[in-house]
Image: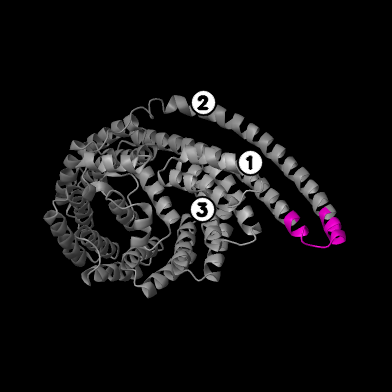
Amino acid sequence: MALIEAEFAAENYEKVIQFADSILMDELVSNQPRLHQLRADSYYYLGDIEKSLESYFQAIHAGEQAEVRDELLLTECYSHAGFCYREMGLYQHAFPHYERSLAIAKSINTDIEIAEQYYNLGTLYQYIGDYENSIKMLDSAYQIDLARKDNVAIGFDLSLLSELKAQTGDYQEALYYAKESLDLYESGTGNANSFGTRLNLVSDRFMQLDQLDSTTYYLDQATKEFMKLDDQWRLASCWLDRARLNMKKKQFTQAIVWSQRANDFYSARSNSQFFILSNNIIAEAYMEMQLTDEAIAILEENQKQCEQLGQIKNLRKNYQLQAKVFALSGDQEQADRWTKKHQVLEDSIQSLNNLEQLNRLALQVKFDKLEQENMILTERNELAESDLSEKTNRLNLLTIGGFVTFVLLLSVFFAIRNRLKRKNQLLEEELAVLRTQIKGLLEGDASDLEVDLSKLNHCLTTPLTDREFEILRHAIGDMNNSQIAEKVFVSVNTVKYHLKNIYEKLGVSNRKQALEYVVRTN
């Protein structure tokens, strides 16, 4: 067991799977739950989510049947099964696993895991748009972190609660949480970069409330902090915020100046996402000033960028703005043309989304069947502890039920497969037409970005959270996973999950490559 644990610590995940498979061939081997967990974790880090989920089911089954239950292991396995379902987009299947993990964590009274599961449930509710329950779960995590005096976690909780309140339109409450997060820094928690970020968050909340003087004050303070740090990426973000502020104040010329400044910065660093965003603000400012020719030229430039980089959603937004500017200029024919192009692209995106939903349905059937099989195995093990006659009767009933369930699942599977075939045929015919209409849309790729560690978040499509940034900072130092876990008060497996998400966001596959990435950006 020590050998496989060492290989896992060294991130040799292929070897871990090979060793685990070899050892698990012996059905009487001890530590089955841990072996299945290591196997599941390894598949997860290698990117095979489906096999990872199957192995978590096996770990859960073995753990539930063990003579001496490892409750912490079961907490992690149920939680990580929820992670897998969440990554596959099967959110409703993730809920019971997170809830089971939370129940076990409460039974063993481990505050860190309890807070973690409340957080997981909160983010899951956020994904499905249930902001009320999301806020309730995240507030529960916040209260636990508050009692534990984990100021790093508290600051992250407050920022996320502010974001959720803003999403529900409760901007006053969102401002309250943002200011609480800022006050926490001023009481001695966080780094200088965190201070500027929290100032920026407060300025955003004031802007949402149209309290523009306060917006200006906090935005000025955030800008000063980033200037002290020479953090050009966050400064560029402040320039875009200032442009938005000028738009609200109807200071369109100033909005163009700040947007162009950000535009030049992003263009020099080949950051197409923010380059297109800054161009959109410039185009909208020109439209407000009735300078339609200038707006059209900007949007044509954006269109080329979107088509070269395959940014379909940005292209859809661009078509919408092009229709608007031509209508403003009085050229209704061109306005109608761009409206139709927008609708065609909208339909193509919807078709692709439908295909994705069908694929998720097939996955759901597969894992429903797998969970049912695990339930049958659990029942059979429980029967082994009962009297012989009772065991025989229950086993017969279970076998019949299992057979009926299998037949039903098989019928559902074939029905869904036939349905998928029919829908796929229709989608292929529709997509064949759409491919011609959006030919060349998906050509090209973004260039690699060179940034130092302090600029990392603004180089990424999906920014790192405060907790992920903290763990990355420790990981590129001389700390191993156990030391990181002790430092940030989470379990080793939770550290590994955070690292896996960090690797995906950085586009790397292990700690060494993450370090090389950060060094290279310096």
Q: Residue at x 85, y 59 (%)?
A: 388
* 252 and 429: which is toward the camera: 429
Q: Residue at x 42, y 35 (%)?
A: 340
Mark 2 is surrounded, within 10 Å at the Cα level, by few (under 14), some (14 to 19) or many (20 or more) other residues, namely few
* 410 and 276: which is toward the camera: 410
Numbered tag placed on residue 470 in the rendering: none
Residue type beneath disc 2: Ala
Closest to the camera, between mark 1 and mark 2, is 1
Q: Is mark 2 on a helix, strand or loop?
A: helix
Earlier along the polypeptide chain: callout 2 or callout 3?
3
Task: Determine which residue is flagged by label 1.
Answer: 25
Residue type beneath disc 3: His
Question: From the viewer's perspective, is residue 237 above or below residue 413?
Answer: below
First to last magenta residue range:
380-395
By what rule are the colours in the image chosen? one colour
Earlier along the polypeptide chain: callout 1 or callout 2?
1
Residues under numbered marks 1 and 3 in contact, where contact means CB atoms less than 8 Å apart = no
Instruction: Give the left or right position of residue 464, taking residue 191 as reference.
Output: right
Instruction: Give the left or right position of residue 2, taking residue 209 as reference.
Output: right
Q: Position of residue 298 (x, y in %)?
A: 23, 37
Q: Distance between the residues labelled 1 and 2?
A: 48 Å
Task: Determine which residue is flagged by label 3.
Answer: 80
State yes or no: residue 285 in magenta: no
Numbered tag placed on residue 432 in the rendering: 2
Residue situated furthest front in the rendering: 2
Q: How far apart are marks 1 and 3 (CA)?
A: 24 Å
Name the quadrant containing residue 22.
top right
Instruction: Give the left or right position of residue 435, taking residue 466 as reference.
Output: right
Mark 1 is surrounded, within 10 Å at the Cα level, by few (under 14), some (14 to 19) or many (20 or more) other residues, namely few
Q: Is mark 3 on a helix, strand or loop?
A: helix
State yes or no: residue 389 in magenta: yes
